[in-house]
Amino acid sequence: MGNCCSDVGGGMTAVGGTSPSATTGNQNDAVDLYLKSRGIHGHFSQIELSFSATSLRDRDLFSKSDPMLVVYIKERDGTITEVFRTEVVLNSLNPTWIAKYTITYQFEVVQTLLFHVFDVDTQFHNVEVKIVTKPNRLLILDLARREDSVSSTHSQHRGKLTVHAEECFSSKTTAEITLRCLDLESKDLFSKSDPFLVISKLVESGISIPVCKTEVIKNDLNPTWKPVFLNLQHVGSKDSPLVIECFNFNSNGKHDLIGKVQKTLADLEKLRFGREGENLFLPTLVGQDYYNKMLKSKLFVDKFSETVQHTFLDYLAGGFELNFMVAIDFTASNGNPRLPDSLHYIDPSGRMNAYQKAIYEVGEVLQFYDADKRFPAWGFGARPIDGPVSHCFNLNGSSSNCEVEGIRGIMMAYTSALFNVSLAGPTLFGHVINRAALIASQSLADDAQKYFVLLIITDGVVTDLQETKDALVKASDLPLSILIVGVGGADFKEMEILDADKGERLESSTGRVASRDIVQFVPFRDVQSGEISIVQALLAELPTQFLTYMRSRDIKPST
């Protein structure tokens, strides 16, 4: 059964229109290049889905249901995977959700989506559909309980779900807007109103689709809300009509409309520079017709500014390079390279071992972003001929030059090193990370348009964990990302500490916290038999890490 009470606090928070982050969404240009190089092409578009429902069943005892929508993808083998969930709408049987789901529509692929509506923590509806095109871009679906037979003619009516689909056209411009109201009408009997704003866009069919909601400000008739951030992609254009509605919050979900205005972003910009307020109006029924009653309440725009969020491709087009570097684990735990059970075994048939696969697949993508294709390559955890154990030696055997020519050069240097060093240990990362950081630091001092990517391939858990953390925290201020591939059967759980999206932000021994996440760790066995490639698993976060660095330092691409 559903909850007896609603999460009032959660319903008073802002949804949508939050400060833009450095995320790149679903785009991954490196992976796209990799797929296209293998002949995988196709027509595709980004589709934004908006959701609303009507006449849902009430599942709560003392209030209306608090519905949330969850979207799943159903694979060809029947596997169902959750891909998206909306916010919870408090006390509503006719919710309109603000959160949107963006899906890549592919002409040649049947994509089956499954929609489940929950009463906060209890599933009570589901419907399965395939994405189809409609002239008005609307799809209205009858909801049924999971237990109801699909073929039954007596399935109990449980409401309707409306899905609105729109193709996305990306925009780099985001408007930051601070809104306030003056002289709002009090809707509460014993206190002042608790106002919040809902901003919606009007689409061709005449319906309004919510884009964002501000936070609720309690007991205030002259509220100023936190800034909202509206991307032009979300509203259409600066001349697209927007409806701004001011409501009085009620915990039972029946929010009172205080008043509203209809303006474009261009109109709001004029209000800001004219420092004038716009009177709210309230649709009022007179006889059989509604008319817009002008109110003394006014909406003001205290701030309106536009910023351009440059994309990963903007920087590449402006001349930025991704410089590839590699470091290979030569510790004894890999096994004797001359024996077939060794992780370093070179198969005479040409079949690549895990080290070779990681180098080849990652390097093959990143080499296209490196102009001279000269790659620093190191080994660690081995004893070169007539020397002590080294935790960072040049893979090509040179005492002064660490670079090799192309991916083929890395492969040849790797094979040669296997016969010119003695595997030893322990597994230390600090030396190679500091070496890569030194190169990145020198490049930064030279004001070069370069970003560095270090690939570390290892068969064991790092033994200098704190020294590695210190090196990573220091490197987080540099144009550098680090990809770590774990090969073999070791337990790599401790390694996930280095990957900030699997835990807390890294902290050094002096208490300094990393300025950003620069590590992506992937156990090779997790991708070896799956559909996702080592490239996709490793490079998924790279554009985001790149953009986080550039934007945090206000580095703009050349035009």
Image: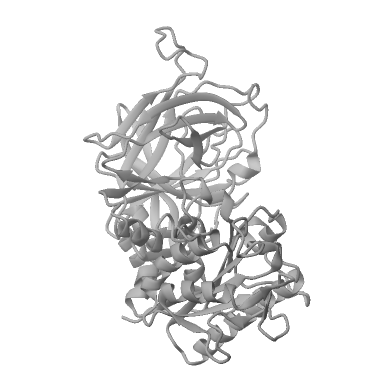
Q: Residue 427: x and y, percent?
A: 71, 69
Which residue is depicted at the point 74% across and 69% down?
Answer: 465
Place of residue 312 in the rendered image (x, y in percent of width and height, measured from the top left): 40, 68
Q: Is residue 541 visible?
A: no
Scheme by which the image is coloured: one colour
Of the pair 399 and 421, the residue shown nearer to us: 421
Asked which quadrant contains residue 188, the reply is: top right
Q: State the quadrant of the C terminus.
A: bottom left
Counting from the top left corner in percent of width and height, residue 145 is at: 50, 18
Q: Tell which of 85 and 272 is nearer to you.
A: 85
Quick one: which residue is furthest to the top in this view? Answer: 154
Which image quadrant is residue 29 in?
Answer: bottom left
Q: Is residue 527 above or below residue 460?
A: above
* Quadrant assignment for the N terminus: top right
Image height check: is 479 above or below 244? Answer: below
Res 407 visible: yes
Q: Where's residue 340, x and y in %?
A: 59, 57
Q: Is residue 427 left or right of residue 393?
A: right
User: Image height check: is 88 above or below 125?
Assistant: below
Compared with residue 419, is residue 93 higher up or lower down, i.e. above or below? above
Q: Residue at x 52, y 50 (%)?
A: 528
Tag count: 0
Identify which residue is drawn at 42% across, 69% down: 366
- At horizontal 51% and vertical 68% (from top left) the residue drawn is 545
